[in-house]
Image (tube, helix red, strand yellow):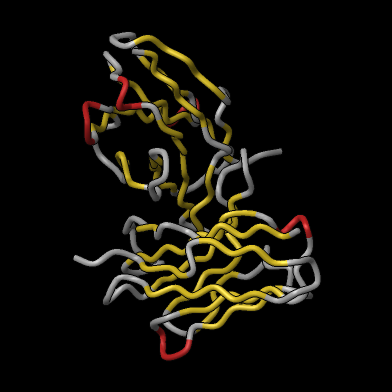
Amino acid sequence: AQSVSQHNHHVILSEAASLELGCNYSYGGTVNLFWYVQYPGQHLQLLLKYFSGDPLVKGIKGFEAEFIKSKFSFNLRKPSVQWSDTAEYFCAVWRGSARQLTFGSGTQLTVLP
Amino acid sequence: EAGVAQSPRYKIIEKRQSVAFWCNPISGHATLYWYQQILGQGPKLLIQFQNNGVVDDSQLPKDRFSAERLKGVDSTLKIQPAKLEDSAVYLCASSLDWASNSEAFFGQGTRLTVV
């Protein structure tokens, strides 16, 4: 079974629609959580990260994510998407026990103008 | 600050040929990662270095893949001989330290096509 699961392979939205991308992981113990974004033709960039503290974290470009420990989830949200948000989004989990960063399979977001 | 540099950007080879990729991490970053990203999938960790030592190579197909990080800075990843299923983007990333919570910074990747 995949250790980091992203449920939506491809999401298509119109501009101004709200976005929520799911991410679940199956590790116990200490984890740090990340969302990376890959715009067309560009390298992976960090969108936001959670290490500890407030489970609601804010990232760049209006994105936020909420860590729900009981659900092993770290869902990405944005209230109103723009055409420029078209990209592939990857959830990643850093496991303290293995010192390893593992990625989900990614979600391709297409925002229609 | 300069980012993670990778070369070449693209490579096309025939199966059974060999190929090498180069990575220069961000200055001062002790940890270096090589990931393989097959089309439609997320990056899969191949090997992880801390300075010039290997800390995880459990998913590296060691019969054909090898990697080194001389002097704890630059790294090369080699495939010999290549197979069709090796067609993928090979990503190099670096972070300050594997034992800390530092984020990984990625290079542009090398897109390998094996024909």
Q: Position of residue A110 (x, y in %)?
A: 44, 21
Q: Residue at x 53, y 50 (%)?
A: A102
**Residue A56 visible within the image:** yes
Which sits in the foreground, B83 or B28? B83
Place of residue A101 in the rendered image (x, y in percent of width and height, measured from the top left): 49, 54
User: Closest to the observer: B77 or A60?
Assistant: B77
- Compared across the picture, whether B95 is left or right of A57 comes to right
Q: Quadrant of residue A87?
A: top left
Image location (x, y in percent) of residue A113: 33, 13
Q: Residue drawn at (62%, 43%), measured in percent from left and top?
A: B39
**Is residue A98 visible in the rendered structure shown here?**
no
Q: In the displayed image of the protein, which residue is found farthest to the left?
A: B1
Report the residue at 42% width, 30% height from top.
A74
Q: Is residue A90 left or right of residue B90?
A: left
Give residue A11's position: percent from left, percent from top.
50, 18
Quadrant where the N terminus of chain A is found in the figure: top right
Residue at the image position 49 percent from the left and 68 percent from the top: B8
- Considering every residue shown, the one lying at the far bottom of the view is B71
